[in-house]
Amino acid sequence: MNIGQAAAASGITAKMIRYYEHIGLTRAPERTEAGYRIYGDNDVHTLRFIRRARDLGFSVEQMRDLLALWRDRSRASGDVKRIAMQHVAELERKARELQQMADTLHHLADHCHGDNRPDCPIMDELAGG
């Protein structure tokens, strides 16, 4: 299949497929004599793996590690779990930070009169004060 068909089958845009190839996350596909990329079922399967990993927020480097483990049938599941749990810890840290930001903004908004006066604790906080 061509890149457009591979994109439709995998849920990854053609631009991202070319990017993943460029950074070495995927192998360079075979090409026709005219230079067009040709993708097979294994390529699409790999792209779907990448899409799901990306949807779960894994970084490119983590996806690279996961792909290597996926291709290694003698892998230890503990290695996969370690990557996943490190990612969970990072997601939980980011979630805490986002919650702290939301709490701060709620507090500031609760103390803002929201009227025609210029006094506003939100603006005071943003101005460093």
Image (tube, helix red, strand yellow):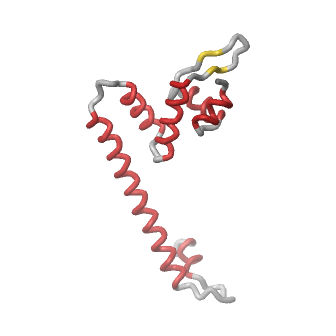
Q: What residue is rendered at 42% in x and 62% in y?
A: 97
Percent position of residue 10, x then y: 57, 35
The residue sitting at 47% across, 47% down in the picture is 57
Answer with left or right where residue 35 lies relative to residue 26.
right
91 lies above or below 129: above
Is 54 in front, or is 93?
54
In percent of width and height, residue 67 lies at: 42, 30
Q: Quadrant of residue 29?
A: top right
Vertical order, 111 against 4 (above or below): below
Say which residue appears at 34% left-offset and 52% top-offset. 89
How many numbered marks have been drawn onto this rendered protein structure? 0
- Corner quadrant of residue 14: top right
Horizontally, is 110 left or right of 7 in the view?
left
Measured as percent of width and height from the top left, residue 122 is found at: 56, 77
In screen coordinates, is 16 left or right of 64?
right
The residue depicted at 51 percent of the width and 24 percent of the height is 42
Q: Is residue 59 above or below residue 88?
A: above
Q: Residue furthest right?
A: 34
- Find residue 62 and report its horizontal and vertical position in percent: 42, 37
In which quadrant of the rendered image does the N terminus lie?
A: top right
